[in-house]
Image (tube, rainbow, N blue to C red):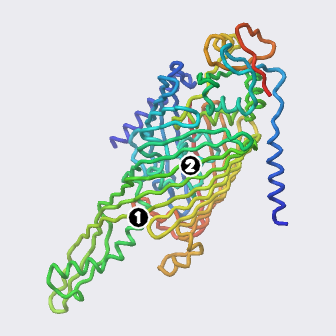
């Protein structure tokens, strides 16, 4: 039964396969012209890791981060399925090999809302309590 | 001295720039971005000199400074370059040079084109091997990421085609195919020099025959003793290959393969001390040089990679084989990093390297009059990293070594000690933004 350890390892790894539920205290927002109504967690991860750069139809995706500690941590941890340190390392690696730059980062809810509502293709996240005028709410599944 | 002064000036300028920027990443505009780092390391070995100058006494010739700027003039096009100064003893002159510089046209997520001097996508960590803040250990496992190969393998000049595909329930595939040439700086060829040293010895008979022919004396009266290799130049006029990384639908898991083939050409002279002795006259000594132009044929390297990142843990393992000339080397490692709080991380690494994968016990080394432990090098390493703040970190690590396969090098930093078991202490601090 030499394959038992391998099976056990596979079982442990597979515990990470199931997608976690999106956090209830965050809402995903986009510019009103963005042609999607919902995104799954994998699509969201590819956007924030710079692997998916176009919306359906070809418009450039412009992701932004809200730097507020608890909101940022929740987003990266629960929606991107990474630790904040790992997310930072990923983008440092991209920067210092010339392969990309991290999403723009804003310090306040108001800045994110303003940028996303005024920038075609933009996507960001806000606390559910934030005002959302001029923004499109995108479901996460 | 001049280049050292230049590097020091650039280092100080870099630090001054970092300080003036408040050590924050620089978003010069929505389309212009900059980053940089300054590192200073220290190596101290017991018994062997290793990696850089005179480590038995302790060496601080282990530093880097880098500054990169990139711009995205259009949604599809990105251009950028990175300057880097690096002092690593005899391996690197401390000049500031262009580390990478290329244009990147991304037509679709599945298809983009890069052209210029591009970091070589080889293994999981080659492209970012100089970026100290990305890992816990001071040194990447030398069994795969040998410092002796760094200058040759860090970047190539040419073209690459790359992309990323979401393969639905099967995860994601990232890929890059490359074609171009490799630069081989003079300081980076010391390890390869051993191959030519051997060929020089094997060519002693040829040198004796040539001298006998020139002097018109019987070849039996002439003996040639190999002295050294002069004016050695290597070039890799072409290399082709690429990397494919599969991220299966298991969070944090990556599996990769990198493979390259290339042509290595070598030019230089074997220098001999020739003795002519016909038994009657006084023996005469004369120098002789034999020019060589050697094609090392198809050189191949294959690297298999695995990485699993989860909740502060980073488990990685890679195996690499490289064929050059008549020998194929093999190196592999397994490493585990753990970040147990925001400030402290630890790592343990085991790596093993065989310069000839068919002589892992050193039997052929012994037959050639060498010590058996020249045939392997095992490295047991533990590392500690402290992040003082978001932009400044300090590392300390200890290596226990078995074997000396990677310390047998020519040049001023050559080891003369023959101990099988030895130790190394490494420390490094990096400031980055």
**Residue B90: percent from the left, percent from the top?**
41, 53
Q: Which mark is residue B297?
A: 1
Instruction: Check the residue under mark 2 and report the chain it is in.
Output: B
Label 2 crowding class (10 Å Cα cut-off): few <14, some 14-19, many 20+?
A: many
Spot occupied by residue B357 in the image (x, y as percentages of width and height): 56, 69
Horizontal and vertical percent position of residue A98:
51, 35
Which residue is at the front of the view, B199 or B167? B167
Q: Secondary structure at mark 1?
A: strand
- The residue wearing badge 2 is B243
Across the whole image, how many numbered discs are drawn on residues? 2
Q: Measuring 66% from the left and 29% from the top, which residue is drawn there?
A: A48
Vertical position of residue B260 compared to residue A87: above or below: below
Is the same chain shared between marks 1 and 2?
A: yes
Q: CA distance from mark 1 to mark 2?
A: 22 Å
Counting residues from the start of the chain, the first of labels 1 and 2 encountered is 2
Residue B358 relative to residue B333: left or right? left
* Residue at 37% in and 37% down: B6
In this rendering, the answer to whether B222 lies above or below B49 is below
Q: Chain of mark 1?
A: B
């Amino acid at each position: 039964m030499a394959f038992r350890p391998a099976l056990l390892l596979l079982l442990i790894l597979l515990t990470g396969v199931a997608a976690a539920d999106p956090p209830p205290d965050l809402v995903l927002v986009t510019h009103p012209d963005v042609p999607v109504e919902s995104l799954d967690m994998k699509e969201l991860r590819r956007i924030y890791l710079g692997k998916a750069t176009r919306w359906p139809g070809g418009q450039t995706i412009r992701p932004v981060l809200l730097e507020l500690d608890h909101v940022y941590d929740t987003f990266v941890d629960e929606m991107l399925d990474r630790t904040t340190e790992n997310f930072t390392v990923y983008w440092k690696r991209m920067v210092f090999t010339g392969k990309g730059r991290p999403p723009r980062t804003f310090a306040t809810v108001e800045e994110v809302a303003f940028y996303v509502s005024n920038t075609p293709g933009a996507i960001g996240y806000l606390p559910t309590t934030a005002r959302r005028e001029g923004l499109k709410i995108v479901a996460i599944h | 001295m001049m280049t050292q002064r230049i590097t020091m000036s650039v280092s100080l300028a870099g630090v001054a720039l970092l300080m003036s920027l408040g050590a924050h990443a620089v978003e010069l505009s929505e389309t212009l971005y900059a980053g940089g780092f300054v590192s200073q390391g220290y190596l101290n070995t017991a018994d062997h000199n290793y990696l850089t100058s005179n480590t038995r006494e302790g060496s601080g010739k282990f530093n880097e400074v880098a500054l990169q700027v990139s711009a995205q003039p259009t949604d599809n096009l990105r251009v950028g370059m990175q300057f880097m100064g690096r002092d690593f003893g005899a391996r690197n002159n401390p000049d500031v040079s262009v580390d990478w510089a290329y244009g990147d046209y991304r037509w679709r997520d599945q298809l983009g084109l890069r052209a210029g001097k591009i970091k070589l996508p080889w293994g999981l960590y080659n492209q970012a091997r100089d970026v100290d803040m990305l890992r816990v250990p001071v040194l990447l496992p030398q069994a795969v990421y040998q410092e002796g190969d760094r200058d040759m393998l860090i970047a190539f000049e040419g073209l690459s085609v790359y992309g990323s595909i979401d393969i639905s329930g099967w995860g994601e595939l990232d890929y890059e195919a490359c074609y171009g040439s490799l630069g081989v700086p003079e300081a980076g060829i010391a390890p390869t020099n051993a191959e030519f040293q051997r060929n020089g010895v094997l060519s002693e008979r040829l040198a004796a025959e040539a001298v006998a022919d020139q002097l018109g004396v019987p070849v039996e009266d002439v003996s040639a003793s190999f002295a050294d290799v002069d004016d050695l130049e290597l070039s890799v006029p072409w290399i082709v290959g690429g990397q494919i990384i599969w991220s299966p639908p298991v969070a944090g898991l990556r599996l990769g393969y990198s493979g390259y083939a290339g042509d290595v050409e070598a030019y230089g002279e074997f220098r001999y001390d020739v003795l002519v002795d016909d038994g009657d006259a006084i023996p005469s000594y004369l120098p002789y040089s034999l020019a060589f132009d050697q094609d090392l044929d198809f050189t191949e390297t294959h690297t298999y990679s695995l990485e699993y990142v989860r909740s502060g843990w980073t488990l990685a393992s890679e195996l690499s084989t490289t064929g050059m000339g008549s020998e194929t080397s093999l190196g592999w490692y397994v490493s585990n990093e753990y970040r147990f709080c925001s400030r402290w991380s630890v790592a343990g690494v085991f790596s093993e390297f065989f310069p000839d994968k068919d002589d892992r016990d050193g039997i052929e080394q012994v037959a050639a009059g060498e010590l058996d432990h020249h045939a392997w090098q095992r490295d047991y390493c533990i590392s500690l990293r402290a992040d003082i703040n978001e932009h400044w970190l300090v590392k300390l690590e200890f290596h226990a070594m078995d074997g000396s396969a990677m310390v047998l090098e020519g040049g001023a930093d050559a080891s003369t000690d023959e101990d099988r078991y030895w130790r190394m202490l490494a420390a490094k601090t990096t400031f980055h933004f």
